[in-house]
Amino acid sequence: MITNNMDDAAPRRPRRLPAPVAATISSLARGILLAAASMLLWAAIPATWGWAPTTVMSDSMAPNVRTGDVIVSMPLAGTDLKVGQILLVKDPDHEGRLRLHRFASTDDKGMLVLKGDANPEPDSSHVDPADVVGAGVLRIPYVGLPVVWLRDAQPLPLVAAAAVGALLFLMVKMDPTTPALFRLRSRAAVASRRPRTAPNRRPFVLVGTVGAVVGVILAGIGLTTLTSAPASAAFSAASPNPSSALSAAAAYDCLTPAAPDSPYFYYRYAETTGTSVTDTSGNARTGTLRGTTTRVAGSCVAGATPALTLDGSTGYVSTPNSVAGTNTFTIEAWFKTTTASGGRIIGFGNAQTGTSSNADRHLYMTNAGKISFGVQPTGTRTAITSPISYNDGAWHLATATLSSAGMILYIDGTQVATNSSVTAARSLTGYWRVGGDTLSGWPSAPTSNFFAGTVDGTAAYTTALTAAKVAAHYAAGR
């Protein structure tokens, strides 16, 4: 006799996603988990060699660095302190706390004056150099958020993070070839599992998965908490501090010093693509690359920051808006070249593109490699020139000022030429350009109007910087 007993029927196997789809989803989830783990390690490992990971607890230098980022600070000797560095210090206003702000200046008592990039004024409490813990050199985003959530008694974000982690672990398990590292059961356990007619144990596996993920997240929070002290201030990202020897991947932004002394514009050339040049003065005077230019990648190593190479025939940078030239100003630029054809490093002209019919306020290099600063207050073009050449393939800082004190030219922070009789420039409306424009008729005019070399930190100011400030810019490095 034939019977049809449903209890004896073989249990149906659950439907599975196609293997390629499962493998893709699993690989994506695995990559996210590994990235999160690597960020935790980046935040914790530097503590083993004496560096200080610090969780940012406020947005005083947003938007580039936010609450919850972890900043790694490198210990510094007192003699290594330089204006522009991001310093981790003992908070002068709250015993037992730390503060992360930028070194802005030194007061008349030798105390450090710090300022948050997002704050309108410097900190009112100054810091003893002996209270400096270190200089920030590495930013790891978001890793410290659990510490902030715990401080603020916010359980919901922690629960949400645990749920996302559990989901990612389950997605990893969708691929049967998942490495043992991500499995919650060993092969032996799988081989010895009970027959399919045994009670369904999937709920217990799910609970175990969630428990494991919660444990990993709590362990990560503990790791970050133990190795990362909180600080009451954040700071901006994007490139190096002087004396740093640690480079980082693009996701872990290096730290960029603030543009000093309120420039009209300040170009650091830290972008990696495109034709726009960010104005780090905060004035939004974005420059535009024109002709043939090449971006030079940088790192967190002092003196190895990003830069811009100009081809010497078509490449230059122009500012966005036409403005009236002033009779009091400073122009400066870091440069490096071996050219024997000279060229204009930075100057002012009435054309944003092409060749200006009227140009003035130049810093240019002669064919001999000497640096000249020229203005034309009347019909006579006047230039002052360095006594020696600088086309030696090394980095140099050229700075020129015009004011009621006359024309002054500095190289590498030291005055090299002056003319106190010329106190004005040509009355002219136009644009600042870096790297190229007409030099026809100027004293010792070079063969090329365009500079063939590499530039960095090019800026213009509507004030005449003092000799002390020029020296400080050079001492801070590029």
Image (cartoon, grey):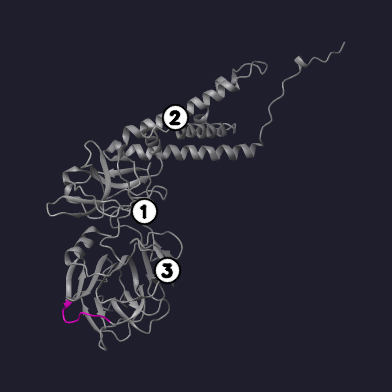
What amino acid is labelled 1 in the image?
A: Ala
What's the distance in space between the residues labelled 1 and 3, CA to CA?
Answer: 20 Å
Residue matched to label 3: 288
Residue 261 placed where, x, y %? 25, 62
Specify the segment rendered in magenta. Answer: 418-425
Residue situated in front as seen by the camera: 142 or 212:
142
What amino acid is labelled 2 in the image?
A: Val
Residue situated in front as seen by the camera: 426 or 85:
426
Q: Is residue 196 magenta?
A: no
Question: Does residue 51 appear in this view?
Answer: yes
Magenta part mainly helix, strand or loop? loop
Residue 208, placed above or below residue 75? above
Specify the quadrant of the image occupied by residue 100: top left
What's the distance in space between the residues labelled 2 and 1, CA to CA?
Answer: 31 Å
Check disc 3: other Cα within 10 Å, few if <14, some if 14-19, many if 20+: some
Farthest residue toward the top? 1
Residue situated in front as seen by the camera: 202 or 28:
202
Residue matched to label 2: 216
What's the distance in space between the residues labelled 3 and 2, CA to CA?
Answer: 47 Å
Circle 1 SS class:
loop
Q: For residue 445, which numbered disc appears in the image?
A: none
Residue 324 placed where, x, y %? 33, 77
Image quadrant holding the N terminus, namely: top right
Total tally of numbered discs in the picture: 3
Judge from the rendering whether residue 168 lies leftward or rightward of residue 415; answer left or right: right
Residue 252 placed where, x, y %? 39, 47
